[in-house]
Amino acid sequence: MDTDIFSQEAKVLADFKKIKEDGTFTQSDFDTLVDQYGKLLRTTKRIIKLSDKNEQRLNQLKTEAQETNEQLEGMSAQLSKFLSPQLYNSIFSGSRHGTRVSRRKKLTVFFSDLCGFTNYVESMESEDVTALLNLYLETMTNIALDHGATIDKYIGDGIMLFFGDPETRGVKEDAIQCVNMAIEMLQALNNLSDEWAKYGLRDHLQMRIGIDTGFATVGNFGCESRLDYTAIGAAVNRASRLETAADNGSIYISEDTYNLVKDSIEAEALPPIHLKGIGEFQARKVVESKSTKSVSMALGERNVSFVLDNLTPEELEAAQHSLTRALSDINTFRDQALNTETEQ
Amino acid sequence: MIFEQTQRTPYVELTERSCAIRGECYPENIAEWSGPVLDALEESMSLSSDTYKVVIELYYFNSSSAKFLFDFFEYLEETAEAGREIVIQWCYRTEDDTMQEAGEDFQEDLESCSYELVPIDVEETA
């Protein structure tokens, strides 16, 4: 048999062309031609009918595929809220799989806590706690994502995040981004102070932050049916302990982190501190970012800092008046306090 | 003779008394695939004069494959006209109207072959 599926039809055509050229057309030839033409017509009709059916089926499948796609997009959009954007992108682009894999990476790890929040919670309505916590976490998360952090988890009011996986800008830049992010978070928390009053909080909330840079094992941990993408290792423990040891409203960083960021971040040396499970540890307290102009002041147990870069000349002048008045008030109050003390 | 199933071509098994075709058929080059199949059919049918049974169970075929099937049935019909007893079963999934209609269309051209449309449950093919 010929391998051309139209070989039979081609042969009929060639035969009849020859008959025409020879001028030997007979009744028998005519009958054959009609017979072959009828067969070709039937075949053509059926192929077209089948082709139309296939097209219809294809369109139906296309519609179903679009609907499935829309459902999957909606589900993945919901799912994305539970994952760090970098992690979500790496999974959905196919570059990372949901299997138990881990690797050793140099990370800058960050832990934060909202000082005394647990105590406030006890005296608040649960709806207020939810709203307050969501406002706080949303503000901090947006700052973290702007700086490229991978958010590992929320632990109540605490946040664990890291820089260096799945995306990295290099160990040094990761560390700088992390500390700058921490500074911005403290400033953002101050800006939220007006919001706290709405929830009946008399005192301003403050954060404690600990940061360390070092090798950690990062990847998927757990069992095949339930995996957690996280980082484990000494750097993670140290960052957590530094956060616990930090003063209210301050950022404690390790010497390893400081060595990476010292060109752009100012941090004062602290006396060796004892970290639980680690021992004596040399840490530093972040003062400010050298790249941004800010003012910091301590009011009792509170540390307050403001960025000046974004202020207009008019706003700077208003700030100057406001602080001068505040300084005058503090002086008056201090004199009164001293006089009262002397009289007693 | 057996032609193994691929992603685009069906499983084909030919013996001197039977032919089975099962799967989907939309090869990139229909002539490349169908030529050897039709040759093998001709050869296997020539080995015996007993009743020849053909069982076809296709889930999808494209237009080029439809042309192959017309040629395939035409050869069977010519062989049946020449005196060989040929029994054809066209199997289709109960909910598959397209394959059912295709089976009915092929039937129209067959007079000398015995032709039967056989609906099958999806569970049986799973």
Image (spheres, coloured by chain):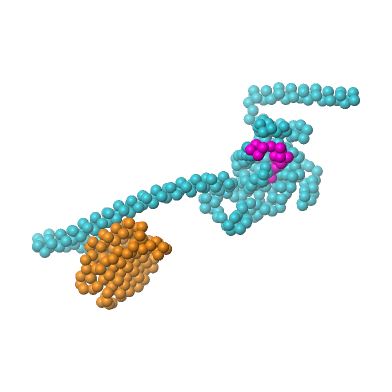
Chain colours: A cyan, B orange
Position of A249 with respect to B39 (left or right) is: right
Specify the quadrant that holds the N terminus of chain A.
Answer: bottom left
Up the image or down, A103 lies above or below A305; here it is below
Q: Which residue occupies the foreground of this view, B99 or A105?
A: B99
| Residue A140 image offset from top left, x and y in percent | 64, 39
Provide the residue span drawn in magenta.
Answer: A110-129
| Residue A171 image offset from top left, x and y in percent | 65, 48
Residue at 56% x, 55% y: name it. A98
Position of B17 with respect to A142 (left or right) is: left
Q: Residue A344's quadrant in the figure?
A: top right
Q: How many marks?
A: 0
Q: Residue A149's quadrant in the figure?
A: top right
Position of A91 with respect to A106 (left or right) is: left
Residue at 65% x, 45% y: name it. A154
Up the image or down, B110 lies above or below A95; here it is below
Residue at 67% x, 40% y: name it. A182
Q: Which residue occupies the foreground of this view, A210 or A120?
A: A120
Up the image or down, B118 lies above or below A303; here it is below
| Residue A258 image offset from top left, x and y in percent | 72, 44
Residue at 72% x, 25% y: name it. A323
Question: Is residue A30 something one can see in this rendering?
Answer: yes
| Residue A169 image offset from top left, x and y in percent | 61, 46
Q: Which residue occupies the foreground of this view, B117 or B62?
A: B117
Q: Is residue B61 magenta?
A: no
Question: Is residue A140 something one can see in this rendering?
Answer: no
Up the image or down, B82 lies above or below A187; here it is below
